Image (tube, rainbow, N blue to C red):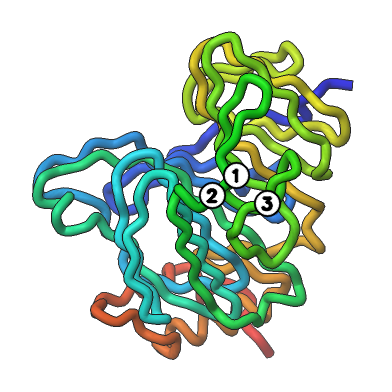
Amino acid sequence: MPTIELVIDPRSQDLGGFSVRRLLPYARRRHVGPFVFLDHMGPAQFGPGHGIDVRPHPHIGLATVTYLFEGSITHRDSLGTLQDIRPGDVNWMNAGRGIVHSERTPPALRESGSPLHGLQMWVALPLAAEDSTPAFQHHPAATLPSFQQEGATLRLIAGTLYGRQSPVQTASPLFYAEARLPAGASLQLSDEHAERAVYVVSGTVEIDGEPLPAGRLAVLAPGGQPTLRASGDSLLMLLGGPPLDGERLLWWNFVASTPERIEAAQRRWQAQAFDKVPGETEFIPLPEDWLKLPRPR
């Protein structure tokens, strides 16, 4: 049996003047463990006076996970959180029954110009936590487990892996880790989680001899402990967990187990009934196609 079950190529998505590469969701693979969304931002270099401006927008039914390699982003949310994230830190926002947030380049970096490179994931909340209380966690890089495993240097962003546990509180079991492998180094991937994927941020690796170039997400077949070997200096992200407890609907910024939950969130946002983000005044209307979706009877 092949080690790699599926290789996913990125699709370019324009987020209002800033392009990202999207890997999940994918038509043939909607999620890996609880991970239902993966965007690769950059690497980009903004000139003086420029940066990102992700205006206030809502979420339900998920946790957003922001992780940077370069640059900084200022996070604001409807809980009153104001937090800059820098490389190696973790911003983990639990949307639960509903939260609103914005993400912008900090003023000082906007003035001087700055790089930006990172990933944003969405983790679907388990059914029992869909209506949980919104919450936000920030964990500086120094608080995350960093360790050597064979020839790799790993930072455990969330969950459990190789007998370590991240301090990030999650609603379900999972793993999410950064792995840096110098040329010629190898790492045997643990089999402690049922669903696993490897994303190559930079470099090229072989997975049990099968090449996986940068920008591709490899979903691995169940079981076994495949060997990851770096052809050159490589940066990988390892992710997965147990199978999700049922399918999820993704529409705009909402994740839910039923159409009714999506529709209720649509009506709340259209009525501007979500909590507001302190210090923000902009409002993004729902996408025009929302009226075409089935409405509650």
Q: Nearer the viewer, residue 249 or 133?
A: 133
Residue 155 falls left or right of residue 192: left
Quarter of the picture containing the C terminus is bottom right
Number of other residues with Cα within 10 Å of mark 2, as a class: few under 14, some 14 to 19, many 20 or more: many
> At label 1, which amino acid type do we have?
Leu
Q: CA distance from mark 2 to mark 1?
A: 6 Å
Q: Are marks 2 and 3 in contact (CB under 8 Å)?
A: no
Element type where label 3 sits in the image: strand
Q: Secondary structure at mark 2?
A: loop
Residue 189 picture location, percent across and down: 74, 30
The amino acid sitting under disc 3 is Gln
Name the residue at 31% across, 55% down. 73
Residue on which the image places disc 2: 144
Residue beneath the point at 82% across and 36% down: 191
Secondary structure, mark 1, is strand
The answer to whether mark 1 and mark 3 are in CB contact below 8 A is yes
Number of other residues with Cα within 10 Å of mark 1, as a class: few under 14, some 14 to 19, many 20 or more: many
- In the image shown, does 78 or 176 lie closer to the viewer? 176
What residue does disc 1 label? Answer: 156
Q: Of callouts 2 and 3, which one flags the residue occurring earlier in the amino acid sequence?
A: 2
Q: What is the C-alpha distance between the residues marked 2 and 3?
A: 9 Å
Q: Residue 122: horizontal and vertical position, in percent?
A: 57, 57
User: What is the quadrant of residue 80 in the picture?
Assistant: bottom left
Q: Which mark is residue 240?
A: none
The number of numbered discs placed on residues in the rendered structure image is: 3
Q: Vertically, is 225 above or below 251?
A: above
| Residue type, label 2 | Leu
Decide which of 54, 288 is in the foreground and name it.
54
- Residue drawn at the location 88% of the way across and 34% of the way down: 223
- Whether tag 2 and tag 1 are in contact, CB under 8 A, the answer is yes
Q: Which residue is mark 3?
A: 165
- The image quarter containing residue 76 is bottom left
